[in-house]
Image (cartoon, rainbow, N blue to C red):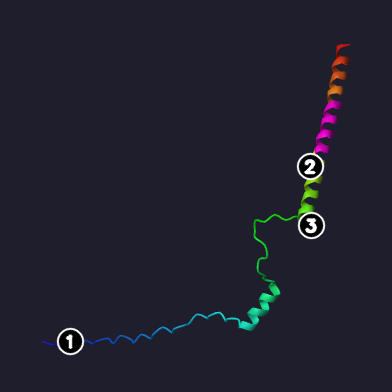
Amino acid sequence: MATKKTTTKKTPVKKKAAVTRKATPKRKSAGKRAALRSHIGLQAEETAFMTFRITKQTVYWLVLGAVVIVFTLWLARLQSEIQTIYDQIDANTVEMSQL
């Protein structure tokens, strides 16, 4: 009997995957942070949030609101006058058709 020689295959050695590190964001130095804060203008709150105080901006909003209300009333009056003119035209048309 003839014996067959079996050849054993060598498994190739697997290389370890290269470990890649994620780039960590560079931190700003304390001097840069302080300079950034001074440019942004972070300030401590001087008054409470819910306090009521009349400022220039309050006056501007009141004037703007008044202008909007007056403009709306003016448009409503114009619309009413135009509707009156249409009613007169319709009445004249009906009167002419009856004659």
Q: Which mark is residue 27?
A: none
Q: CA distance from mark 3 to mark 1?
A: 103 Å
Badge 2 amino acid: Ile
Q: Kindly indicate the quadrant of the structure image that contains residue 85.
A: top right
Is residue 25 shown above or below 78?
below
- Marks 3 and 2: which is nearer the front? 3
Identity of the residue furthest to the left in this view: 1
Label 3 to label 2: alpha-carbon separation: 20 Å
Q: Which residue was labeled with disc 2?
A: 69
Q: Secondary structure at mark 3?
A: helix
Q: Which residue is mark 3?
A: 56
Q: State whether the magenta stretch is mostly helix, strand or loop.
A: helix
Look at 77% across and 56% down and name the residue there.
57
List the residue tagged with mark 1. Answer: 4
User: Which element carries disc 2, helix, strand or loop?
Assistant: helix
Amino acid under disc 1: Lys
